[in-house]
Amino acid sequence: MPIFHIAHKDDWHAAHDVGEYRISTRDATLDQVGFIHSSTAQQLPGVAERFYATDEAELVVLELDEAVIVAAGVELKYEDAGNGELFPHIYGPIRPEYVIQAREAHMDSSGRLIYEAAEA
């Protein structure tokens, strides 16, 4: 099953070049938080609205292969976000080979996430 992570486009491109992405969520790193926040397809719009509605940076939505992440030996846990809803957390960096597709994205004027298919 795919899971998703929203990233600033510049951060993803820089990380892709060095072989790993280490941003947990907007303005926080993997080292600071201990894991990388991600979401299911159903959770993605809500996450975008809560954390990126006012973000003017170019975004990408990373579609990640959960099985490849786990097969690489990276711990992936579904954990309570404090409201009973379980979100996937990746306890390690995202490597390019975990990415099925990177979709260019932006927030529209009403704060909704808009994204299109693009190459990883």
Image: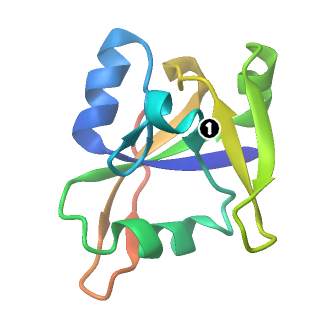
CA neighbours of label 1 inside 10 A, class few (<14), some (14 to 19), many (20+): many
**Side of 95 where 57 appears, left or right:** left
Image x and y of residue 51, in percent: 41, 67
**Side of 33 where 42 appears, left or right:** right
Element marked by disc 1: strand
Res. 97 image quadrant: top right
Residue at 55%, 74% (x, y): give it: 46
Extreme residue toward the left, this view: 56
Q: Nearer the viewer, residue 75 or 34?
A: 34
Residue at 40%, 62% (x, y): give it: 115
Q: Nearer the viewer, residue 2 or 73?
A: 73
**Side of 69 where 59 appears, left or right:** left
**Side of 96 where 105 appears, left or right:** left
Residue at 80%, 48% (x, y): give it: 78
Q: Nearer the viewer, residue 109 or 52?
A: 52
Measured along the vertical axis of the image, is residue 104 above or below residue 91?
A: below
Residue at 52%, 19% (x, y): give it: 95
Image x and y of residue 117, in percent: 44, 51
On the rendered image, what quadrant is the C terminus found in? top left
Image x and y of residue 17, in percent: 30, 14
On the rendered image, what quadrant is the N terminus found in? top right
Q: Amino acid at mark 1?
A: Leu
Measured along the vertical axis of the image, is residue 2 above or below residue 11?
A: below
